[in-house]
Image (cartoon, rainbow, N blue to C red):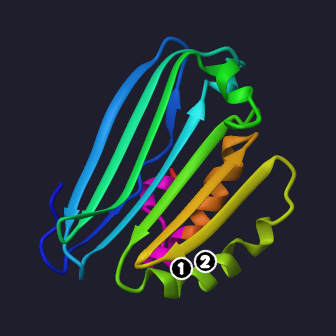
Amino acid sequence: MTLAPGASLHWLPQDTILFNRARLKRRFTVDMTGDGELLLAETIVFGRTAHGENEIHGTFRDDWRIRRDGRLVFADAVRLDGAISTIIDEPAVAGGAAAATTIVLVAPDAGDRLAPLRAALAHLEGRAGLAFGASAWDGRLLVRALARRSADLRGLVEAAIPPLARSTPPRVWNC
C-alpha cells in the first residue's frame, strides 16, 4: 500500500486463526510520508481452540515492511514451519501461548500516545496467562502481547485502539 501525504490508515482486522495444516504466507508493505499515520493491529490465534484443536502443523510466514519517506522504519518477519504447536511451546518463542498480537503505530506523535496507551492497559497488568509490553521511539510505537486465551488479546486490542487511533474499535468487532 502507498499512503498519500497526510493520509491515515488503520488496519484492524479480526483475529487470524491458524488451523491445523494451514499454509499462510503473506506480505504487508506500506510506503508512507512523514506526516502520515499508520496503525496496524494483528492477532494470530494458534488453532481452533474452541474446537479443542491444540496440535497444529503447517506453515505461517508473515512479513511486514513499513517505509516512511523512502526509509525503512519497521520490519518484522515470522516463520513457523512444521509442528507449529511444538515451536510456540518453546519459552523463547511464545511459551505455550494460544495467541499473539502485534500492534504498530507509525505517526509523527506516536511517542505522545504511549502514556495514554499504558493507562488504558493498566487494568490488564498481572492478569494470569497474559503478557504484554509497549515502547515508543522516533515516531513509532510497538505493542507485543501473548496470551493463553485469544479473548484476553481481543480485550487488550479493544483497550489499545482508543488511545492509539483516537477512535473506537470497528463496529464489526461487536458482532
Dots 2, 1 in contact, CB < 8 A: yes
Predominant SS along the magenta part:
helix
Front position in the image: 68 or 113: 68
Seen as rendered, the residue at the extreme front is: 71
Q: Measuring 52% from the left and 31% from the top, which residue is drawn there?
A: 17
Q: Which stretch appears magenta?
A: 161-173
Coordinates of residue 157 in the picture (x, y in percent): 58, 60
User: Quadrant of the image for the N terminus?
Assistant: bottom left
Residue 163 - label? 1
| Residue 15 on the magenta segment | no
Q: Residue 127: x and y, percent? A: 85, 57
Identity, as a three-letter code, of the amino acid under mark 2? Leu
- Residue visible at 65% across and 60% down? 156
Residue 38 falls in image quadrant: bottom left
What's the mark number on residue 46? none
User: Foreground residue, 152 or 61?
Assistant: 61
- Residue at left 69%, top 34%? 98
Residue at 59%, 71% (x, y): give it: 135
Residue 33's place in the image compared with 15, above or below, is below
Left/right of residue 106 with respect to residue 69 in the rendered view: right
Q: Nearer the viewer, residue 150 or 50?
A: 150
Give the vertical position of 172 relative to 138 (above or below).
above
Magenta run includes residue 162: yes
Determine whether, in the image, residue 82 is placed left or right of residue 8: right
Mark linked to residue 117: 2
For the residues labelled 2 and 1, the Cα–Cα distance comes to 6 Å
x%, y% of residue 54? 70, 19
Mark 1 secondary-structure assignment? helix
Residue type beneath disc 1? Pro
Q: Position of residue 47 (x, y in %)?
A: 61, 24
